[in-house]
Image (spheres, coloured by chain):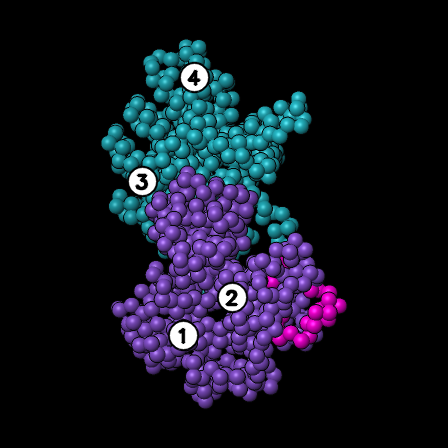
Chain colours: A purple, B cyan
């Protein structure tokens, strides 16, 4: 697939590296030559120096013949203009990263499409949704559901004392037919487990299951659920604003922000939410605002390090659920090992959206979730695709992927070796980073 | 991983050797056996390396890229020299290695006093070595082996392709390599047909075409292109294709896609053309002033042929150009130093770098008068990063040092003073001229063995544009 990416910022370069590893043709546009130089020299992609909103640059990047145009410069209006030009020059699908809910509002959808923007990515919105899911189910790290929960993928960290610690995977699978362990994250690395792998203390297991059995998972993993009501947010960032607006009916929010300017503007953006000026790293302040009575702590400042460390402090003073925004991808697995409940990352969320587009040109039906070094995708099976030719055990699947579950006629079920996949099924695939193109081949 | 890729590369070399073997077989020569056995042995070693080396990881870093690229060129020459050792007119190990390295690096300096009487297989193999080396061994591999289509391939691409920055013409490295090779292949085929249409046999056309497009300079005739010197047609056709061989292939690609504007706005291309025209005026004036112009060809086509042949580092000669006097000779030195455009098959320091140098020198002079003015080096209407300018200047300094260093080493081997420096220069710039200019006649055969090894090394450094080879000799490269 020919993909043009405008903007080599954090999201843009992350996408470029990722997609180039997925064997796509990548053109990367940015006006900063130095930023491009390192990417150009080290990755299998081509760069074009120039302004992403100029016709000349976009022509030079051969936008006219591209399948996907992604505008992820820091400015929303630039992205919209770039998409508009690209669409007019002949780009198949255009995606713009936006900064305000305005462009996502269904009432404006026609206008947005008219401007030449087919899809929008609003990482802050997606991040806020992620956080809300995490707050609703405090014992889960990742939650991915298809078709109103017919199939659910849940990431759970195993602790000493859980009944299944020390079991071999094949023994676990034998006694628990309603769960499929799709992947295990162990020591900074995600693996697709085989029957002989042991389930260890400290592993994050990715279970696939159906809605009826999700509560059994609690007992299996030795977790208890506790309801979250009061949430303390550190940092009045864009994600915080989205979070408060999305979740104000279910949760009671308090925001601590150290910048007075931002504090003054917050009441306007987040009505009925308590705003405190101060530094959440200060333990006296935390005691003052009654932090120990809070149910959850969400750290959303611009600094990943601050977010990680304050989450640890919050754990110490007795807050049970913590969520941190970690923008440095290399810190994510460290943060997960440090017992931070849920980690969100805007880049990964943005790439999830792009992967959806990659896997399925008409992606209204499929979903995708990007983890630090793996991806989860829902794919619709087309008639005649390779995957329908034999039962799963005879398909000779690559080691980097596993088929977790499927939805047939609106009903979720798990996949085992004898399952024969039929056209029209929606299949949940778990694959390690860089293997998505193999999955794509299997489904075409 | 290094061994495995080297294995694949050797398989490819083995495949290329099949062609001279078949040619020899077709002409009923005994060398067909030599080529057949060599091709088989090369492919076998390649197969063993590719099959039975266990790569620890498929990741390739910068170090691996440099090491592999430099290593591959040496290994290719080592296998490529085998036919010379065992052919019907065998030569020694040193000579064979020199001949092979000179071929792959498209230097075209030969140790063969006369190539007449060599088998057709040998002729074809000499031509093919240049042709493979001209566009690049690694680049060919990138085009045909899909496994290298990742960032490891990028490192190798960077280490091999000539030029200051490496302009990709397609998003993925294998597509870039394929496009470049396709252009190269297309040019070669057209040239073969054009030459064949003139007074040249098909076999000679192929050999000469390989030598011209790759800007190598080996010919299949002991008189060189002089053997066809009475045909203006042949000369004109060769001039055009040597010229094209000196143009940045990325630029040719753009033109083929219909973007002719880029030609006009490309500073390097304009300088390249301008330089050739200025040289032509100077050459012609000198020839006329010396009264050596008997026909119009003598003061137009002949000097033009010599100019293009020198500036693109081909090293073909038709006439006895040293008879044109010392001024013309010194102009020849200048052109050998400059070379043609980066990203082409030619050698030398490349016009791009010379442009950087001159523009930067101009800025420095201006700064003497206006110390506070901010000046930038601009190429193709783009401001160049100062880091790049200093890299180019470092390149040119090392380049000069290598010429002098190589010359010194040659004098230590007992080669006369002028000859030493000239040969060192000629080999580092991959021109391979040297025949008439130096005292030792038509070939490099007369040189002592040590000198030949030094020159082979110079050719390798010159072809891989210094840094790729020299970085292997820095302690930092081996310290992890």
Does B382 sit above or below residue A231?
above
**Circle 4 residues within 10 Å: few <14, some 14–19, many ≥20:** some
User: According to the image, label 1 marks what residue?
Assistant: A148
Instruction: Point out the tag, 1 or 2, that comes first from the N-terminus.
Output: 1
Eye-nearest disc, 3 or 2: 2
Question: Do dots 1 and 2 share one subunit?
Answer: yes
Q: What SS does tag 2 mark?
A: helix
User: According to the image, label 4 marks what residue?
Assistant: B281
Q: What SS does tag 1 mark?
A: loop
Eye-nearest disc, 1 or 2: 2
Q: Is residue B265 visible?
A: yes
Q: CA distance from mark 1 to mark 3?
A: 58 Å
Eye-nearest disc, 4 or 1: 1
**Circle 3 residues within 10 Å: few <14, some 14–19, many ≥20:** few
B160 or B149, which is in the foreground? Answer: B149
A202 or A228, which is in the foreground? Answer: A228
- The residue under the point 36% across, 32% down is B260
Eye-nearest disc, 1 or 3: 1
Which segment is the magenta one? A280-306
Splitting the image into 4 quarters, where does residue B285 fall?
Answer: top left
């Amino acid at each position: 697939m020919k993909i043009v990416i405008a903007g080599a910022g954090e999201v843009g370069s992350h996408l470029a590296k990722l997609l180039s590893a997925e064997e796509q043709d990548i053109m990367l546009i940015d006006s900063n030559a130095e930023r491009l130089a390192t990417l150009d020299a080290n990755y299998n992609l081509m760069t074009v120096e120039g302004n992403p909103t100029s016709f000349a640059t976009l022509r030079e990047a051969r936008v006219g013949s591209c399948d996907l145009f992604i505008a992820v410069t820091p400015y929303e209006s630039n992205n919209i203009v770039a998409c508009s030009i690209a669409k007019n020059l002949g780009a198949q699908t255009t995606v713009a990263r936006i900064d305000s809910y305005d462009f996502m509002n269904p009432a404006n959808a026609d206008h947005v499409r008219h401007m030449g923007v087919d899809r929008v990515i609003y990482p802050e919105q997606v991040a806020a949704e992620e956080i809300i899911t995490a707050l609703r189910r405090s014992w889960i790290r990742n939650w991915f559901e298809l078709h109103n929960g017919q199939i659910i993928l849940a990431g759970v960290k195993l602790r000493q004392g859980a009944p299944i610690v020390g079991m071999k995977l094949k023994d676990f699978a034998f006694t628990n037919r309603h769960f499929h362990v799709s992947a295990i994250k162990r020591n900074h690395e995600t693996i697709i487990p085989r029957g002989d792998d042991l389930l260890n203390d400290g592993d994050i297991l990715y279970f696939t299951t159906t809605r009826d059995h999700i509560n059994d998972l609690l007992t299996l993993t030795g977790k208890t659920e506790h309801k979250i009501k009061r949430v303390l947010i550190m940092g009045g960032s864009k994600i915080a604003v989205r979070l408060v607006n999305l979740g104000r009916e279910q949760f009671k929010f308090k925001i601590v922000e150290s910048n007075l300017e931002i504090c003054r503007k917050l009441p306007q953006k987040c009505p009925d939410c308590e705003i405190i000026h101060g530094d959440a790293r200060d333990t006296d302040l935390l005691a003052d605002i009654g932090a120990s009575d809070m149910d959850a702590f969400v750290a959303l400042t611009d600094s990943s390090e601050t977010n990680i460390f304050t989450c640890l402090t919050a754990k110490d003073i007795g807050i049970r659920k913590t969520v941190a925004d970690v923008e440095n991808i290399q810190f994510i697995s460290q943060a997960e090992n440090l017992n931070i409940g849920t980690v969100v990352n805007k880049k990964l969320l943005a790439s999830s959206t792009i992967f959806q587009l990659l896997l399925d040109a008409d992606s209204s039906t499929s979903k995708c979730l990007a983890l630090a070094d793996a991806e989860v995708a829902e794919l619709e099976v087309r008639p005649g695709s390779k995957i329908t030719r034999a039962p799963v055990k005879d398909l000779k699947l690559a080691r980097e992927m596993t088929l977790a579950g499927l939805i047939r006629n609106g009903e979720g079920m798990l996949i085992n070796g004898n399952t024969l996949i039929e056209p029209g099924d929606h299949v949940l695939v778990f694959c390690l980073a860089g293997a998505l193109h193999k999955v794509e081949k299997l489904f075409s | 991983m290094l061994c495995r890729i080297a294995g694949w590369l050797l398989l490819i070399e083995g495949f290329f050797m099949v062609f001279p073997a078949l040619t020899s077989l077709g002409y009923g020569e005994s060398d067909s056996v030599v080529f057949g056995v060599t091709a088989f042995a090369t492919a076998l070693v390649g197969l063993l390396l590719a099959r039975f080396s266990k790569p620890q990881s498929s990741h390739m870093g910068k170090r691996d890229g440099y090491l592999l690229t430099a290593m591959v060129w040496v290994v290719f020459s080592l296998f490529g020299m085998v036919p010379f050792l065992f052919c019907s007119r065998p030569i020694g190990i040193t000579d064979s290695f020199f001949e092979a390295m000179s071929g792959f690096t498209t230097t075209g300096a030969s140790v063969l006093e006369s190539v007449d009487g060599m088998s057709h297989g040998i002729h074809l193999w000499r031509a093919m070595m240049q042709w493979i080396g001209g566009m690049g061994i690694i680049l060919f591999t990138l085009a045909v082996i899909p496994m290298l289509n990742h960032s490891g391939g990028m490192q190798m691409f960077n280490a091999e392709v000539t030029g200051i920055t490496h302009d990709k013409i397609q998003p993925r490295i294998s597509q870039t390599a394929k496009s470049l090779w396709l252009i190269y292949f297309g040019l070669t085929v057209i040239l073969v047909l054009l030459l064949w249409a003139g007074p040249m046999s098909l076999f000679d056309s192929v050999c000469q075409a390989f030598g011209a497009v790759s800007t190598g300079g080996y010919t299949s005739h002991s008189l060189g292109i002089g053997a066809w010197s009475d045909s203006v047609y042949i000369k004109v056709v060769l001039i055009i294709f040597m010229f094209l061989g000196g143009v940045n292939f990325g630029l040719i690609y753009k033109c083929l896609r219909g973007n002719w504007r880029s030609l006009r706005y490309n500073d390097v291309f304009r300088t390249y053309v301008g330089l050739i025209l200025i040289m032509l005026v100077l050459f012609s004036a000198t020839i006329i002033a010396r009264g050596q112009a008997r026909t119009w060809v003598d003061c137009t086509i002949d000097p033009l042929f010599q100019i293009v042949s020198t500036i693109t580092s081909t090293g073909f000669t038709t006439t006895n150009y040293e008879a044109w006097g010392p001024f013309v000779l010194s102009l020849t030195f200048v052109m050998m130093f400059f070379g043609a455009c980066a990203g082409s098959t030619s050698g030398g320091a490349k016009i791009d770098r010379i442009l950087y140098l001159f523009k930067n020198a101009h800025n420095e002079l201006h700064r003497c008068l206006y110390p506070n003015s901010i000046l930038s080096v601009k190429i193709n209407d783009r401001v160049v990063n100062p880091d790049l300018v200093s890299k180019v200047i470092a390149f040119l300094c090392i380049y000069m040092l290598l010429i002098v260093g190589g010359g010194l080493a040659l004098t230590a081997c007992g080669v006369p003073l002028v000859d030493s420096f000239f040969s060192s220069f000629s080999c580092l710039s991959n021109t391979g001229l040297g025949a008439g200019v130096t005292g030792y006649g038509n070939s490099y055969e007369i040189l002592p063995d040590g000198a030949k090894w030094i020159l082979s090394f110079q050719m390798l450094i010159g072809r891989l544009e210094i840094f790729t080879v020299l970085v292997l000799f820095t302690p930092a490269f081996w310290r992890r």
